[in-house]
Image (tube, grey):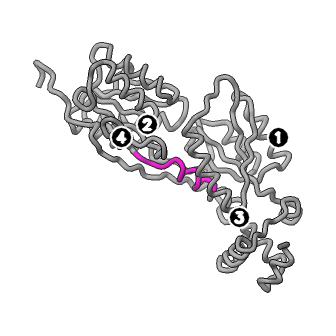
Amino acid sequence: MNLKQLAHMLALSQTTVSRALNGYPEVNEETRRRVVDAAKRHGYRPNPSARRLATGKTGMIGYVLPTGASVDIDPHFVEFLSGLGDYARSHELDLVLSPADADDQETTYRRIVANRQVDAVYISSPRPADRRVALVNALGIPFIVHGRSEGLDFDYPFTDIDNEGAFHEAARLLIQLGHRRLALINGDDRETFAIHRERGVRRALVASGLALGDRHVCSVVMTEENGYRATRRLLEEGDPPTAIACSSLIMALGVVRAVRDLGLTIPGDVSLIAHDDVFPWLRPENFSVPLSTTRSSIRLAGARVAERLAARISGLEEGARGEVWPVDLVVRGSVAGAKAIPGKV
């Protein structure tokens, strides 16, 4: 079925059908749904070249993918991409990955915008005063940031979770259970999410007259091996922590392995809370001791970023609105009251 046949069947003009399929805001929601449902039912697929000529849009979302020897495949990114892809696929959008040198992504952003290869882009893993955010804002292409950057002198659209609030509540729970020596095994502290998580832990400790010692903070790439090494270092040094907050379930696998190898137990010797991005293949309740977590689905975040990008492409969303999602604290068996220290009250 072509556009003319679909329009005739629906008793609508070809222009109206085309605009409905491409999300133009002047088409009312009832008509848009009627057109989309009919297109799906009859297997109509718009010709990409014709659509670009008619609308000036490619139907593509762009992402600049850092590459190089120092870049690892990140399961968090893959899960986010799955959510984004699910939404994009169901709304006739394609995702274009443009590889770039990790130290020179700006050149690639300029190229894809100049060549009009995509209608919008998203930026992930933002850092403070992130130059990528400043660049795409200046280039004028619709964009969304997954996460937040601090230190910019303009507002911009983003979708983020309350990383500071999540780790503040996790630390506060551990303090309420009597823990006074907390450690944080964090992600890359050059990135804003990790900065916010450390800030949350420190804020909870300060409120109770405590402090997070510098040697009780580990900033590492979020892998199982790094979680293992960080935990061994924390627990083998003097004055070890009695509780650990961990930025990833993947790192928590290494924490659990290290605690076991040292002949200790969770939560008998060490309480543990980790952040859960809700991976379908790694569930906190299936750990040897069910794991307490701060929980927020990164797959849903991917779908939301795609939804907002589609709205910005079609003109349904404008401005620089930021979204901050609350995070659940789920308490399971990996936390308990701190052991009394002999000779201390």
Q: Amino acid at mark 3?
A: Gly
**Between marks 1 and 2, how big is the CA–CA gap?**
37 Å
Q: Which residue is under mark 1?
A: 111
Q: Secondary structure at mark 3?
A: loop
* Sequence order check, earlier mark of 4 and 2: 4
Residue extending furthest toward the bottom:
11
Instruction: Give the distance between the C-alpha atoms of the residues marked 4 and 2, in whole angstroms.
Output: 18 Å
Say left or right for 230 vs 125: left
Q: Which is the main secondary structure of the residues drawn in magenta?
A: helix
Q: Amino acid at mark 1?
A: Arg
Indicate which disc, 1 or 2, sits on the residue closer to the N terminus: 1
Name the residue tied to disc 2: 249
Asked if residue 311 can be seen in this view, the reply is no
Q: Quadrant of the N terminus?
A: bottom right
| Label 2 Cα neighbours within 10 Å, binned few <14 / some 14-19 / many ≥20 | many
- The image shows residue 233 at horizontal and vertical percentages of 38, 16
Q: Which residue is label 4 attached to?
A: 168
Task: Evaluate if marks 3 and 1 touch, with contact meaning CB atoms under 8 Å apart.
Answer: no
Kindly report the distance in space between the C-alpha atoms of the residues bearing marks 3 and 1. 24 Å
